[in-house]
Image (cartoon, helix red, strand yellow):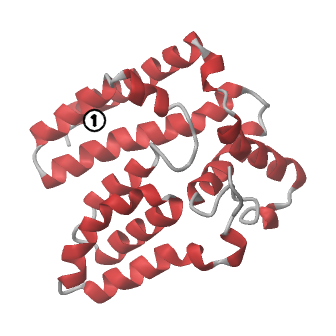
Amino acid sequence: MTRRDRFLLACLVVSRVALSLAVLFDEPGRFRQWEESYNATIGHFLWATGRWEQLLALQYKSFCGGCTVNTVLAAPLLALGDHLLLWKCVPLGWTVATHVLGFMALDRRVNRAAAWAWAVLFALPMPGLAYLDLMAWGNHAESAAFVLLALCLPDRPFALGLTLGLGVWFCRTTLYAAVLAVPALIGPHRLRFAAGLVAGLSPLFLPAAQGDQGAY
């Protein structure tokens, strides 16, 4: 990418963040939700008490490793103050990552024109996506970042397997990316891919990371 390309992409990313903030400030109460707030609460608790050994045990649900990730991301932010905007920096961060990774994936796997089309369309999303991207549930919109990162790694089998495995631990939503595993499993570097996949999936086998098994 040229310096001009990086500048234009940065402008589109900033535009998307500005749009999201406008949506948030227009109706902040819409983006306060008890289930999402659990992750923020645990982040605040862990930072205040230093009881980090309880991190996995306090994971919201067994299918939501992303809840734990968002908790870790939120903890230092909420140390600055118990404020909604600080917490919303977490989903905004995922939005920025998805925006940039989508550009990189399409630029690598398709062409530059497709990458720019993504960058422009993502900067002006449909309202439903703009609303979803402001919620840090840990098992919804964030999953796209793992899939797009995997699309950037076709020539790095271990990293590809690790990304896909961590994506499944992060949230089961990323299982739709299993199609990316097929060529890697039958390719010449399948053992390296399999090793990365097992490493990525490993948190699923930790008893402490099973989360709340109860019903909603």
Q: Nearer the viewer, residue 104 or 212?
A: 212
**Percent position (x, y) of residue 83?**
74, 27
So how many labels did they put on this image?
A: 1
**Which residue is under mark 1?**
6
The answer to which of 68 and 115 lies nearer the viewer is: 68
Secondary element type, mark 1:
helix
29 left or right of 148? right
Which residue is at a point 25% across and 28% down the rendered structure image?
121
Residue 100 x/y as whole percent = 33, 41
| Relative to 186, residue 56 above or below | above
Which residue is drawn at the image coordinates 31% and 61% (left, top)? 177
Q: Does residue 27 sit above or below 159 in this rendering?
A: above
What kind of residue is marked 1? Arg
* Image location of residue 150, percent across then percent down: 32, 61
Which residue, as the protein is rendered here, is positioned at the far right? 49
The N terminus is located in which quarter?
top left
Left or right: 176, with 58 as reference point:
left
Indicate the position of residue 192 as horizontal and vertical percent values: 33, 85
Residue at (46%, 65%) from the top-left corner?
168
Q: Is residue 179 left or right of residue 92?
A: left
Q: Is residue 147 left or right of residue 79?
A: left
